[in-house]
Amino acid sequence: MGAEGMEPAVFEHLMPFEFLCFSFPNPLPSPENPYSETLRVAVADAPSSPSKTSPPAIAAVLVPNRREDDWVFSTAAGHFQLLLFLSSPNLSISRLVLIGNLPSCSSSLPRPYSRSQSDGEGASLDCFQESLMPLLYALCPKAAFVNGMPSIPFLVYEDGVIRCNPVEKVVGHRAGEMLVEDVEIEVSPELRELRRRLRFKKMPNLIQTQVRLLPDSVDVEVFRPEMGSLVQPYLGPMVSALFLNGLAIDEGFRSGNVPFVLCVGVGGGPLVTALRWRFGFRVLGVEADEEVLSVARRHFGLFEDEFLKVFVDDGIRLIEDYALERSESKLFHAIMVDLDEEDPMNGIGAPPAKFLRRNVLAGARMALHSKGILVVNVIPSDESLYAMMIKLLRKFFCELYELKVEDGENFVIIATASPIGSDLKNMKKQGGIFEKLKKLGCESFIAGIKKI
């Protein structure tokens, strides 16, 4: 709605999970200002109530020009996740205001984005931000003024994207609206990479899948997905967990009993592809949404053979069924779980709460080979929930190990079906799985595995 239809009183008090959006005239339109004459202003309050001992913190973000269609900035889910991401121990944000151009409201693909085309001059943006301060003060709750005029910082959301070209937008019956996009990423000041990514609208700030794009061997102007790409920050740590039961894996290969791995959550397929083509395992992938698998085949290089099979099913229910009837012919050397919390209002978290039901954990234990491991990608949404998960896993598994991911958000938890401590002393003297992990640069991850 327009600013004229918005009652100022609605902003006087903080309301957890409140989200309001309206249009507002640009107070400083000029050729140097990259923002249009009409702005979109979105206001979101944090899920929890602020501390009563200090005034609530208010912050603002200027949506990068030409990224106004990006779900991170244009949806309520993206806004709330951005609020949580930008908060810190030094700045616990109670209200976050996003200001940018109006989204296109088109059902087609978002416009391509290039950072160099979208940034305004520093001085002009400083003036623009200053011109927005009266609006921001008007959007502050009364409690923010208890000690005088509040300080309202403009924060910057930096995801390293230099260029973005949307490829396809589709809708799945479980995943909802999805976007495939090719991006140029600034990995470091000296390194840029081309990557293909998959994102879901319901969790827009979370990259579901990303793989490197490499020049085709025949036509260097054509790029293809890297086979078994492990650029997703937590995938290297997940496969490094195989070091813990490496002796059993190597023995399986020597005896002709090729190790069997179950992957719950396929996404674009880089993990199942890496396990098949880089390690030579038999791999079974389970994905809840057929359209996600179709996207993986069309855009991420996923294809099946006699060693790699993927199918549509509820992976958690599949694991739970092992608690009812153990199938000796289908025991796994590893079960790898990469599932996110389905409710975006709970914040970004993994695994979903339903995975931690007792029947599911019992089924996971029953589904494992005697030397098998359960490997779980974990994004703790709360320290107490993380502690509860560890406590539950101890009830069903012999040993627990933890590996912190470099991005600072993820953990990889490894639960073993039997004691493996004595095996670790002999692993580096062996070839097999350890040598394959070394070729993938996993030695630092292996060194970071800690028993908990």
Image (cartoon, grey):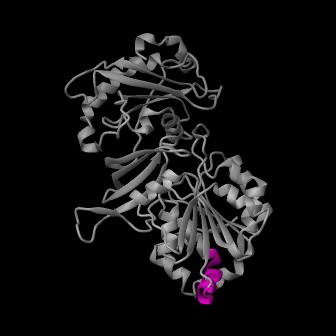
Q: Nearer the viewer, residue 41 or 138?
A: 41
User: Is residue 319 depicted above or below 46 in this figure?
Assistant: below
Number of marks drawn: 0
User: Is residue 368 depicted above or below 195 in this figure?
Assistant: below
Where residue 266 sits: x, y (%)?
Answer: 53, 59
Residue 95 in view here: yes
Is residue 74 shown left or right of residue 326? left
In the image, residue 251 lies in the stretch drawn in magenta: yes
Is residue 367 shown left or right of residue 380? right
Residue 331 in view here: no
Q: Quadrant of the N terminus?
A: top left
Where residue 187 sits: x, y (%)?
Answer: 37, 57
Q: Identify the residue at horizontal 61%, vertical 74% (top origin).
A: 260
Where residue 326 sits: x, y (%)?
Answer: 77, 69
Q: Identify the residue at horizontal 54%, vertical 80% (top origin).
A: 434
Is residue 449 shown left or right of residue 100? right
Quarter-of-image position of residue 447:
bottom right
Q: Main secondary structure of the magenta part?
A: helix
Chain part drawn in magenta: 244-256
Q: Nearer the viewer, residue 327 or 43?
A: 327
